[in-house]
Amino acid sequence: MLQLYINYPSWIHPEIFPSIPFLNLIRWYGLMYIFAFATAYFLLKKVAKEGLLDSENYKFAEDDLFSFITTGIIFLLIGARLFSTLIYDTSGIYLKKPWLIFWPFDQQGKFTGLAGMSYHGGFVGGLIGMIFWCKRHKQPVFKWVDAMVCAIPAGYTFGRLGNFLNGELYGRITTMPWGIVFPQAEKFSSSLSWVKNFAASINMTILDNTLVNLPRHPSQLYEALFEGLILWLIIWMLRKHKKFDGMLSMIYAGGYGIFRFVIEYFREPDSDLGYRISSQTDAPIYLNTSLFNFSTGQVLCFFMILFAIVGTITLVILNKRKKQISKK
């Protein structure tokens, strides 16, 4: 019988050269960050040449672009790491030993890089960094942030591909034929009746009294597609038609928040965190049993959507007032 699932490719490893000394320190996830930042810089430069940053008193300079994006990246990495270690970590070790937050080795001395980064922390950190740069260089904040969000989703796509190559942040179990068996996912006892029925429905052969690894939604790829490519295309097509500075920024915040909120129903929450808000007692995280069970990511996305709504209303009002004043 045809199996209705996909096995995670055995040749994919987190390390690019897993068997070569020293080179095995180079990981796909880190390389994806380089691709992401390079893509963001290339697209930011393109929109700057199109005039999105020009004003009566300013004509963009390439040195400014590099300074701007570098400042944003530094703050992004700091924010992403702080959120990951202080909000998503439940061990408390980073509160007791805060110097470990930016320490790239585990307790056994093995190099891990900065394993664990939070998107929402990166969003907050990057935004603070861009505002800081604009204030320091006396540039209009929303004009520059609008230009930046024309690039961010395309770069973000690489980050989620890095998660897929790491075999992490996978989704809940699924009977969809594109479900993937991730090696690191939680296994279930084959003695459970629901596991037997689930395996039978996807033509998976299992042995008695064994632990079974069931296929999962490739939620990293869902995110790469919707929060990355599709969101980027929406903003890219609207970049020359914005009605006011800040419009693209709010579309990005709201669009990402909506896409991620929905995809979180397919992505498995962190096992140590579970649901932040739940309508059920002891609801399993490997199944979506209720639309009213909300993960940490969904709670943070709700605030992103709220930020976008309030921000849009505020900017529309301010823009109208500005036009009225200019007419007088």
Image (tube, grey):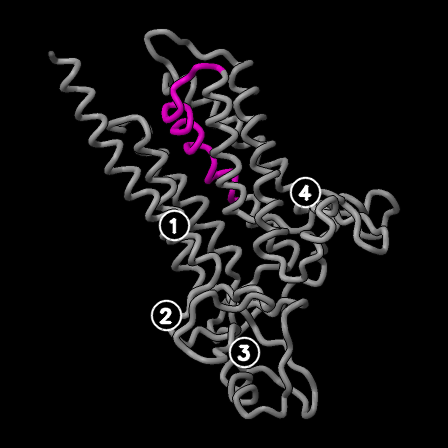
User: Which part of the image, by quadrant, shows the N terminus?
Assistant: bottom right
**Which residue does the numbered mark 4 point to in the structure image?**
30
Across and down, in percent, residue 192 comes to 58, 91
Q: Closest to the observer: 207 or 257?
A: 257
Q: Earlier in the sequence, mark 2 or mark 4?
A: 4
- Tell me the amino acid under the disc marked 3: Leu
**Which residue does the numbered mark 2 point to in the structure image?**
292
Q: Earlier in the sequence, mark 1 or mark 3?
A: 3
Q: Dot 4 lies on which element?
A: helix
Quadrant of the image occupied by residue 30: top right
Q: Which numbered disc covers residue 42?
A: none
- Tell me the amino acid under the disc marked 2: Phe
- Tell me the amino acid under the disc marked 1: Phe
Above-or-below relation of 230 to 59: below
Residue 15 part of the magenta segment? no
Across and down, in percent, residue 322 comes to 20, 20
Q: Earlier in the sequence, mark 3 or mark 2?
A: 3
Label 4 crowd (10 A; few <14 / some 14-19 / many >=20): some
Residue 143 part of the magenta segment? yes
Residue lying at the far right of the rendered structure: 21
Q: Dot 3 lies on which element?
A: loop
Mark 1 vs 3: CB contact within 8 A: no
The segment highlighted magenta reads: 137-157
Which of label 3 and label 2 is nearer to you?
A: 2
**Which residue does the numbered mark 1 point to in the structure image?**
303
